[in-house]
């Protein structure tokens, strides 16, 4: 049996990109990227695969038929591609690297790797003297427009990483009344609950921690993506889903 490279998951990501491009008759621009950026793109396609089962997807804001991924918080989201999804009367957008201004306080702003938000949400821009010395625009969307914020970490899981995701959960979602608010959790929900995607696998005690967090909060923690567990619809792995208010 041939031993696989530790980075064989990159092949899975490349296949996901090629499949996405083929299905929607687009091309994709490939530049030299760090492994973390490739991992994020793989997570994006795992997410679009999840939605594709019950939503109509449409790549948007292409440039000459090319899908442009945004893998840095410094980019202008309006200059990059995203996916528009429709289910019933609901239309929403799946985007990368959109900064969220929290409902907790306008000075709390951060950029998750992936954001699912209502279509037409205003991506605000302004020059802030405390951001890049006022030389670049500060882009953000209000947390009231956020359905779910997701984070991708191409690393091994550890307790502090898992717990830190709770902070993002609280700050990003205006619909959350408390960290343990599971009122929107439903078996047939259209949306994946806020999810932390992790490349590595966990030890037994950390797996118990993951199960406890998923049972206590409206989140998912997906482990082992480096080993190929990209299918979010695997019936053996029950994922928390949410509806929108």
Image (cartoon, rainbow, N blue to C red):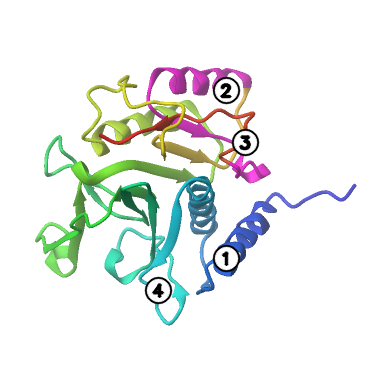
Q: In what element is the residue under mark 2?
A: helix
Q: Quadrant of residue 125?
A: bottom left
Residue placed at 25% from the left, 22% from the top? Answer: 178
Specify which label sits upstream in the sequence, 2 or 1: 1
Specify which label sits upstream in the sequence, 1 or 3: 1
The answer to whether residue 96 is left or right of residue 208 is left
Residue that mark 3 sits on = 234
Q: In what element is the residue under mark 3?
A: loop
Residue placed at 12% from the left, 65% from the top? Answer: 134
Specify which label sits upstream in the sequence, 3 or 2: 2
Residue that mark 2 sits on = 207
Closest to the observer, 116 or 197: 116
Circle nearer the viewer, 2 or 1? 1
The answer to whether residue 76 is left or right of residue 213 is left
Would you say the residues marked 2 and 4 are in contact, meaning their CB atoms lie under 8 Å apart?
Answer: no
Specify which label sits upstream in the sequence, 2 or 4: 4
């Amino acid at each position: 049996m041939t031993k696989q490279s530790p980075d064989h998951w990159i092949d899975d990501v490349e296949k996901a990109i090629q499949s996405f491009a083929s299905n929607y008759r687009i091309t994709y621009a490939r530049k030299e990227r760090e492994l973390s950026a490739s991992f994020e793109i793989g997570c994006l396609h795992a997410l679009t695969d999840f939605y594709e089962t019950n939503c109509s997807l449409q790549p948007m804001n292409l440039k000459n038929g090319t899908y442009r991924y945004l893998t840095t918080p410094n980019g202008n989201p309006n200059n990059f591609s995203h996916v528009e999804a429709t289910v019933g009367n609901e239309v929403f957008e799946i985007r990368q690297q959109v900064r969220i201004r929290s409902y907790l306080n306008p000075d709390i702003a951060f950029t998750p790797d992936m954001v699912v938000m209502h279509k037409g949400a205003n991506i605000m821009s302004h020059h802030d003297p405390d951001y890049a010395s006022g030389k670049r625009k500060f882009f953000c969307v209000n947390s009231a427009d956020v359905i779910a914020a997701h984070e991708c970490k191409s690393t091994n899981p550890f307790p502090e990483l898992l717990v830190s995701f709770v902070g993002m959960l609280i700050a990003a979602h205006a619909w959350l009344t408390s960290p343990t608010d599971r009122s929107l959790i439903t078996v047939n929900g259209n949306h994946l609950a806020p999810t932390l995607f992790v490349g590595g696998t966990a030890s037994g005690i950390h797996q118990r921690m993951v199960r406890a967090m998923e049972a206590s909060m409206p989140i998912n923690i997906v482990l082992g993506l480096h080993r190929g567990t990209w299918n979010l619809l695997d019936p053996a792995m029950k994922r928390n889903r949410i509806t929108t208010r």
